[in-house]
Image (tube, rainbow, N blue to C red):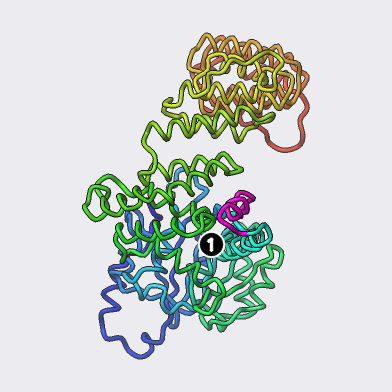
Amino acid sequence: MRWLPTLSLVPLAAALSLSAPLAIAEMQTVCTITVNSADEKEAFRRHLPAAKYQFVELVERGQPDWLASACRAAVSCDVLIISGHYDGSNEFFSDQLEAREFLPVDELERVSCSDSCTGLFARLKEVYLFGCNTLNPQPLSSATAEIVRSLVREGHSPQEAERHLRSLNAGHGESSRDRMRQVFKDVPVIYGFPSTAPLGPIAGSALGRYFQTTGPREIGQGRPSGRLVGQFASNAMSVTQGMTDKDPHADVRRDVCQFVDDRLSDAAKLDFVHQLLQRQTAEARIHLDRIDRYTTTLGDPARRTPEVVQALDVIARDAAARARFLDFARDADQPAVRTRMIKVARDLGWLSAEERWNELAQMLGELQARSAVGVTEVDLACTLNQEHDLDGAFNRAIFAGSPADDVPHAAVRACLGSADGHARTLQGWVSPNEADVRIAQAYLRHRPITDGSELRRVAEAIVRMPPSDAQVRALEALGRHYVSDGEILALLVRLFSETSSWSVQAAIAGILVRADRRSLASPQLLQTLIKDRRPSPPGDNMIDALIRRLQSP
């Protein structure tokens, strides 16, 4: 994990260790976590008087554990500002291509749930979340129909099962807003955005206008500001407060903390996982993301310790929990959920390697029997078989004209090592049906063509396609192969001159701009681009970018 440049926390630690005068003691500390734009932080810094507010950037370049550094510096935050793009569920990140900085929400949960750094967020009065969807109230996940079926199997009436489903969704749906309320427990004021947040420079300007009219008097008071919310009305800024012990779903937070509290040993966390698995299977399903993340991060060294060996052995020998869990997995409506449950069962010792293979093969066979599959299923099959250990999981003959004799089903088979499926999917790549090309594109993201002669044959077929959205998409799929083959490039340049479609020309330019520049070292190419380009909508496009590249020294 890498972090952005920051002011060193060492001088701050020294300062905090001294006996400060009363004025310093009354200062408020504004902590910042700057993962992307610094515009918001700088707007606060410019307008808050240095005599009353000190700023501490918690993120440090090259510091894999920013929390430990902040704890060593004895930082205690009154105000927290987090700036970064937010993926809506798991992390804040940067949009700069060269940057690798990010902030996992798991880290914030660990700070909130653990006792190893109680002071960092203990006196927080306000949190400012400058990222999209940080306070989105829509559930990130929702319990689905298989939960109702599972509850009925466990003895509930259909009506009771439906009521329980609604209760689980309300308490465990884990919207972004609910997750932030759990992280920032007891914080009086949390600002954020239910959907799109303003970009850094725009947010910085809005904050500047707010401070110019209001000044700093509302900051760090623990009371929501209608003026601030109004300043961001175009982005629908919202405000909430942290969860308290009296919250109706406080028990959900207690369960969440069992996964991340660093005071708990791995054996204790596994004991809690076992408790979840012994509850109604519906609850284990709701916590599937966290169980999966935890068992994935439980590495071999930890698994070899006597305490963890014993905890895993207790789970592995729980035949009743195993049966309930696998029955639920096989009944899951979504193949992706079933796949993850099979993985968790393997991680917990409920499935051997061979049993896992058989479970996945059965699921993939059932998937192939569906009348319709799509991009999601192709992605799943290829991802599952990244190591080719599932090659041959589906070997049934496919009859011409059967429901499985189409490009989507063929792409799933191709992901599972079928040569016939591969050939049929490549036919879809050059199909006039854009939906078939989309399926081939999904397959090729996982299984790009590495044979030069095969790629040339496909390129020739793409060039022969009529100008259409399907041809554009087929060219985009070709571009992901970073083509520098002279024969293919010559075909594309000829197509650029002959096509009547500017969209096709833009797709060709997208391929050429990625090619090795030495392959394009031809004055004739630049002349062709300028002379033969078709009229296009206003504004720059990929053709302009390619021309500039060729004109540059």
Task: Looking at the picture, tell me which residue is in the foreground, 332 or 37.
Answer: 332
Bin the neighbour count of mark 1 within 10 Å (Cα to Cα): few under 14, some 14-19, many 20 and up. some
- 295 to 550, vertically: above or below: below
Residue beneath label 1, please?
A: 39
Residue drawn at x 45%, y 65% is 255
Start-end of magenta stretch? 142-156
Residue drawn at x 33%, y 63% is 262
Which residue in the rendered view is the most extreme toward the bottom?
22
Which x, y percent locates residue 187? 50, 76
Element under disc 1? helix
Which x, y percent locates residue 46? 51, 72
Task: Looking at the picture, tell me which residue is in the foreground, 102 or 442.
Answer: 442
- 388 to 138, vertically: above or below: above
Which x, y percent locates residue 43? 54, 68
Which x, y percent locates residue 218? 57, 82
- Does any portion of residue 3 appear in the rendered image? yes
